[in-house]
Image (cartoon, grey):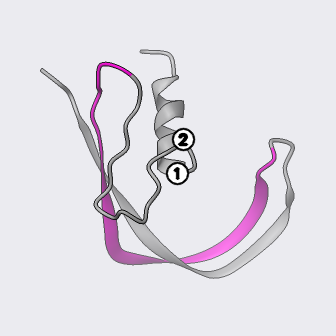
C-alpha cells in the first residue's frame, strides 16, 4: 500500500515587504505584512521507487530543481526516518 500525504498550500498577498539584510545561510531576513486569500494549491506527496518526480497541471511551472516545491521535497526526502 502506497501512503500519500495531501496538503493545502494557501495563497497570500504581500501588502508590505521589507528586505532587512542577508543571513549567513544566503537567504534574506524579511519583514512582511500578508493578507491571506481563500485560494490554495493542493500538494500531494507520494513515494516512488527511484528518484524524485514533480508533476503540475500548469506547463509553465518548472518541474526540475529550479522549483522551490521540488527542492523542499528533496529536503523532506533526505530527513532521517522517525
Q: Alpha carbon of mark 2 to alpha carbon of mark 1: how far?
A: 6 Å
- As rendered, which of 30 and 62 lies closer to the eye? 62
- The residue depicted at 37 percent of the width and 43 percent of the height is 54
Picture quarter with the C terminus: top left
- The residue depicted at 38 percent of the width and 65 percent of the height is 10
Point out residue 73 in the picture as x, y percentages from the top left corner. Answer: 46, 37
Q: Which residue is mark 2?
A: 71
Picture quarter with the N terminus: top left
Residue 5, numbered label: none
Span colored in magenta: 26-50
What residue occupies the far left of the structure in this picture?
1
- The image shows a total of numbered marks equal to 2
Point out residue 31 in the picture as x, y percentages from the top left corner. Answer: 73, 69
For disc 2, the neighbor class at 10 Å (few under 14, some 14 to 19, many from 20) is some
Q: Are marks 2 and 1 in contact (CB under 8 Å)?
A: yes
User: Circle 2 — which element?
Assistant: helix
Q: Is residue 45 magenta?
A: yes
Q: Is residue 68 magenta?
A: no
Decide if residue 51 is on the left or right side of residue 21.
left
- The residue depicted at 47 percent of the width and 55 percent of the height is 62
Q: Which residue is mark 1?
A: 67
- As rendered, which of 55 and 17 lies closer to the eye? 55
- As rendered, which of 69 and 17 lies closer to the eye? 69
Point out residue 42 in the picture as x, y percentages from the top left corner. Answer: 29, 57
User: Circle 1 — which element?
Assistant: loop
Residue 46 sits in which quadrant?
top left
Helix, strand or loop for the magenta stretch, by majority: strand
For disc 1, the neighbor class at 10 Å (few under 14, some 14 to 19, many from 20) is few
Decide if residue 21 is on the left or right side of residue 14.
right
Amino acid at each position: 500500500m502506497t501512503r500519500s500525504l495531501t496538503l493545502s498550500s494557501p495563497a497570500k498577498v504581500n501588502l508590505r515587504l521589507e528586505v532587512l539584510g542577508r543571513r549567513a545561510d544566503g537567504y534574506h531576513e524579511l519583514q512582511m505584512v500578508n493578507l491571506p486569500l481563500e485560494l490554495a494549491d493542493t500538494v500531494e506527496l507520494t513515494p516512488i521507487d527511484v528518484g524524485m518526480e514533480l508533476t503540475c497541471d500548469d506547463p509553465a511551472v518548472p518541474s526540475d530543481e529550479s522549483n522551490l516545491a521540488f527542492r523542499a521535497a528533496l529536503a523532506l526526502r533526505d530527513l532521517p526516518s522517525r
